[in-house]
Image (cartoon, grey):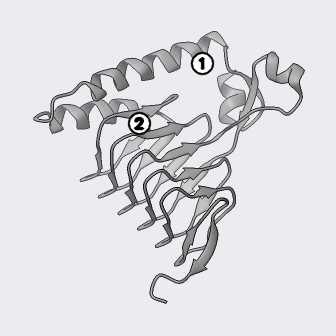
Amino acid sequence: MRDRMLAGEPYLADDPELVRERQHAMALMEAFNRSPASGPALRRRLLTQLLGAYGPDAEIRPPFYCDYGYQTRVGARTFVNFGLTVLDTASVTVGDDVQIGPHVQLLTATHPLDPGRRRDKWESAAPINVEDNAWLGGGVIVCPGVTIGENTVIGAGSVVTRDQPPNVVAFGVPARVARSPDG
């Protein structure tokens, strides 16, 4: 099932291999989320074990939650405030110099509309990309398959359901481009 998930195909969420991988991620998250404020080296070591990539001078403040970890890549000098949730059943790529406000959700998972397939625990996912120097305000939700362009600002509380171009300010439910950052 892991190969199906990684290929973006429908997969069974309760597959034993996927359950083991989520439990491994949970153990690392638990240690990270309980780490002392005086332990930045410990937090970096835990995130390096958990995530697919964790760039130099990046910072993620606890608590942090994810499904697998290895599907998430965080670039250099990126800052993530408290309470990030990443459902990384597909890849999540966060570029360099990104700013992420508190309680942001990056959600790659999707579920079938057919009730029988949903009851049988089938899922699928689509990747999320947050390009360099983007800023996601507090409480932003990014839906499956979305790319947020370089230098783009997403206003607090927005729900991003489709790609946002580079160099804009977007906000709302659903998020829509409002203007360029300097205008």
Kind of residue at disc 1: Leu
Relative image position of residue 10 (x, y in whole percent) = 78, 30
Residue 106, label in figure: none
Q: Which residue is mark 1?
A: 18
In the rendered image, the quadrant that contains the N terminus is top right
Q: Which residue is mark 2?
A: 51
- Relative height, residue 128 to residue 96 (above, below): above
Relative image position of residue 176 (x, y in whole percent) = 65, 70
Q: Residue at x 82, y 32 (%)?
A: 112
- Relative height, residue 152 to residue 55 (above, below): below
Q: Answer yes or no: do the residues labelled 2 and 1 have beta carbons within 8 Å? A: no
Kind of residue at disc 2: Leu
**In the displayed structure image, the side of residue 125 where residue 114 appears, left or right:** right
- Relative height, residue 175 to residue 55 (above, below): below
Relative image position of residue 158 (x, y in whole percent) = 56, 58
- Relative height, residue 171 to residue 42 (above, below): below
**In the displayed structure image, the side of residue 50 where residue 127 appears, left or right:** right
* Closer to the camera in the image, 33 or 20: 33
Q: Residue at x 25, y 24 (%)?
A: 34
Q: Secondary structure at mark 1?
A: helix
State which tag comes first along the sequence, 2 or 1. Answer: 1
* Closer to the camera in the image, 95 or 61: 61
Q: Residue at x 43, y 54 (%)?
A: 138
How many numbered dots are placed on residues in this image? 2
**In the displayed structure image, the side of residue 121 where residue 150 appears, left or right:** left
Q: Residue furthest left?
A: 38
